[in-house]
Amino acid sequence: MDAKEKPRVAFFSFTCCEGCQLMVLSCEKELPDILSHINIVNFREAMTEKSDDYDIAFVEGSISTKEEIKKLNKIRKTARVVVALGACSSTGGLNCLKNRYSMEEVKERVYGKKAALSNRHVQTIPARPIDAVIHVDYYIHGCPIPKKEFLSFLTALLMGKKPDMTNHPVCVDCKMAGNICVFEKGISCLGPVTRAGCDAICVTYGTWCWGCRGLVDDPNINAHEQTLKRHGLDPEAVDKKFALYGNCKSSNKCLTPKK
Amino acid sequence: MGNVNDFKFLSERGFQGLVKGLLKELKVYGTIVKDGFPAFGEISAPEELVLSSTPTHLSAKEFFFPQREVLLKFNIKTAAFSPVIESVDQAIIGMHPCDIRALSLMDRVFAAGTPDPNYLSRRSKTLIIGSDCMPDDYCFCKSLGNSEAESGFDIFLHALGKGFLVRTGSDKGRAALLKYAKLRAPSTKEFREFQGLCLKRDSSFKAKVDAPPAELPSIYAKSDESKVWQKIGAICTGCGSCNNVCPTCYCFDVKDEVKASLAEGERVRNWDGCTLEDFAKVAGGHNFRKTRAERLRHRFNRKFRYLSSTFDSLFCVGCGRCSRACLVKINIVEVTNELVSECHNK
């Protein structure tokens, strides 16, 4: 294939830890093959060159300043395909925890009393997923994204196949992994309503599902709230459990701006 | 319970010797304790085995029909492909009568129509060592008429206070015992102890289905419009655990996974489950079973009605794993009994 015909791919990062970009870079074994099919023209974590001409934009991070909204709109205008990369981008992620407080309180908590009074340096707005600002074509979920999912998404896109997005709960991945259910062990988790695709690694390695991949398409939240209550969580604890990652798109208590 | 002549006595040490012998020849899986719960796992020494009186979390189906397996390797550029059948000689120790019954049903499913070479290859290389159990709150195999394992095993162990009474079910089982274990005829005392344990087990079942198994297909056939489906559909999260822990749920999905070279790839088979939202979704996005109520009704009917005409058997073996795993407490015996009672009151 001629180099000019290769799709031009850009990676952008907003409010996040940039761990999902790192997952892309850690596909070391596959990168040579990947680079024979695409041209990467923008990738701050990996290169200095930049270009405003690209076909596919992978967008990582949630949107938490007005400046970020402007930049994101520009990306949408330029790219033919926009992909939300990781939890912050696809559901709002951990950043949305701050939306439970007033922005003044948040600024003061992080930057101290002086910063709270200043509008010059800290222009924060409630954090939101990128689809609260622009139309998103595809989502790759997770905190961080699984390498496997990024690769299968990219190969599908390059072959003109419909990318396969998991829509079953984490319980399925847990059974695939042969795990004992965490509820049996007296712990509680968000597996029954959370989108799988992660191979249930958190449970496999001894913790529980935190809900980082957001909810399945049709979650039965009420039923799972009842399960959590039956396992001893009070309503506030249930609310907190959902708030960590998933609340942003599920509960009416959530202050996160939506689609 | 059988005749005393059908049994031999095997000491604890004899059993350890048998397992040690098998470990030299085969991959050995058996019941172990995982996070405090009974589960099947690979063992490398007899001490790791813990024969469990209650069912394991997952069934033993993964040793014949793994969660994920490669069926085919291919290359798009060269159009070359080759089938993959991964199977090794293996022994599975600690399968209960319900698990053995379930395996005999799976044998028929995977041999019917176009026989499944992957399953059948694993099955033919497997030595089954069954073991006794004691019902917990969810076990109801007795209600379905399969609380005793009459066949389907190579060796069956009945644990006594000390040692085992042993039955053999195949030449393969007899040969393994002959090679690795010293057996003797059981004493009268040992046989009495066994009889006592059988009676205790038989009277320990708490969960019961309120109709004979032969009537269940027709009871389910009359229950399509029952309110039970809406009731359990409202609390189901669609997590698929009932399918995945079930020893007779055999549905799968096949996908092609292409490597980053966009040339080589693998055709992979994964477990699938009819209670999952996308199970009956087809091209274009139409879903034949949109609601959780419809999906549950389908699953229950698969266990008690639909397959009974094809295979002349219920496809529930009464292990109770689905009820045990269900976080919203949908209980297969309670649901069935509600349908039984609705039918009798009609």
Image (tube, rainbow, N blue to C red):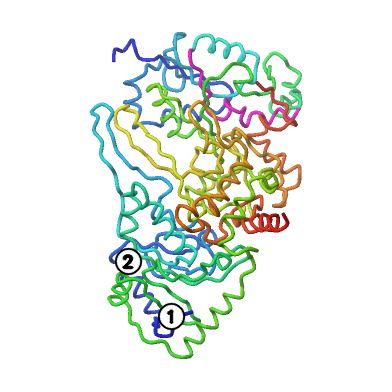
Position in image of residue A174 (x %, y %): 52, 47
What residue is pinned by disc 2?
Answer: B23
Identified by mark 1, the residue type is Leu
Check disc 1: other Cα within 10 Å, few if <14, some if 14-19, many if 20+. many
- Report which quarter residue B88 is drawn in: bottom left
Position in image of residue B194 (x %, y %): 50, 82
What residue is pinned by disc 1?
Answer: B165
Q: Which quarter shows the N terminus of chain A?
A: top left
Q: Is residue B168 above or below residue B125?
A: below
For residue A19, side relative to residue B47 (left or right): right
Q: Residue at x 72, y 15 (%)?
A: A119
Identified by mark 2, the residue type is Leu
First in sequence: mark 2 or mark 1?
A: 2
Instruction: Please give the range of residues in magenta.
Output: A80-101
Q: Is residue A109 above or below residue A72?
A: below
Q: Residue at x 65, y 52 (%)?
A: B330
Q: Residue furthest bottom?
A: B188
Q: Report the mark closest to the observer, 2 or 1.
A: 1
